[in-house]
Amino acid sequence: MGLRLYDWCEVVLDGPNTFVDAAIRYLWPQARPVPAHDALPQVRLVLGRIEPGLVAGASRRRVTLYSSPDGRVPDYNEGVEYTGAPGVDRLVLNPHTGSHFLVTGHRVCVVNSEFEAGMRDALRVIKQLVTTAFEAVGVVTVHASAFAVGGEAVAVAGRAGAGKTSTVLAAVANGARMVANDKLYACTDTGGTHVRGWTDPIRVIDAPGHPKRSTTLAVYFAGDADRVVEDPLPLRTVVLARVGTPSVPVRCEELDRAAGLRELRREVLPPRVRWLGTEPSPASDPAPPTADRFLSLTYGYRDASQAVDLLMRRLHA
């Protein structure tokens, strides 16, 4: 099946129907079916193991698969590349999941005997292709969440655990629309910055004291695409969230624009590692993101709704 992601990046998925269906749910609402053809990049999931002869005489070296903004991703940061494997341009192993990535031209075959691990790595290949395609035209990835109000995006930045997702979900419960819960694609030109969101799952807490669980946007919003923004929106406001203990007073204050810009640009992630070997080079010196207004939002972790009420009043002031 062919998919168009973010209106212009196309890829063909091949493998078990359960993989294709799961990928469409995971990539919702940005995935649109399109006709498949040979010129498109292909990501194929194969359940099984590679032939031992592929790596028997190949040399090995360690490679970086992904550099995480919040530290290590336990099953994805480091890999092993085999040089000289017959019949393929590149063969990479994720030793943490057991997935082998066989790259031939613009086709990537992900081989794993376990469906969940293989599907997770196949989805990572898709995100690799999308992100590097964006980076090639000067789009940067910003480590921030965002919601939409009045046709404009409000980005929520902060360290891990600062309350980015909590603030956005509280804003959505207040009537805003979801843009992203962790990362934004940001394109900046003379007209300012426009952003759109990743489709990664949300980590939510069902009740105080319960552990976080991950759920896709499709499940969280019950397939209601009207609650999620798919198209690029102008970024006008950036909120620096600081979640504390229940005793912390709720405050929403204006920030100096120069200081706010520095904080925003600290959240720009470096270009992704080009480990597949098929990715285009990133654009040189992409324009950094910008915004017109910066706010600081401080609240206790149980007071997200009250904090967002105050934030909304400030946004409309």
Image: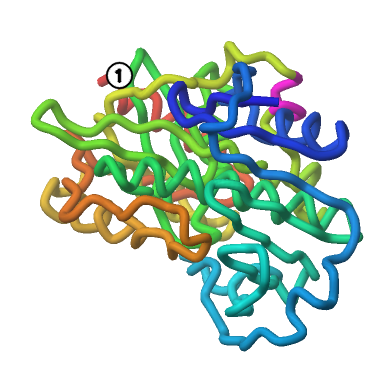
Q: Looking at the image, can residue 295 be seen?
A: no
Can you name the residue that lies furthest to the front here? Answer: 87
Q: Give the quarter of the figure containing the N terminus.
A: top right
Circle count: 1
Q: Toward which corner of the image does residue 222 lie, by quadrant?
A: top right
Residue kind at label 1, given as amino acid type: His
- Percent x, y of residue 95: 74, 77
Q: Secondary structure at mark 1?
A: helix
Relative placement, left or right, of 50 versus 271 is right
Which is more toward the observer, 142 or 116?
116
Q: Is residue 7 magenta?
A: no
Q: Looking at the image, can residue 138 be seen?
A: yes
Colour scheme used in the picture? rainbow
Q: Identify the magenta region.
A: 218-222
Relative placement, left or right, of 21 versus 169 is right
- Percent x, y of residue 106: 54, 47
268, above or below 187, in the image: below
Q: Main SS type for the magenta part?
A: helix
Which is more toward the observer, 256 or 3?
3
312, above or below 65, in the image: above
List the residue tagged with mark 1: 316
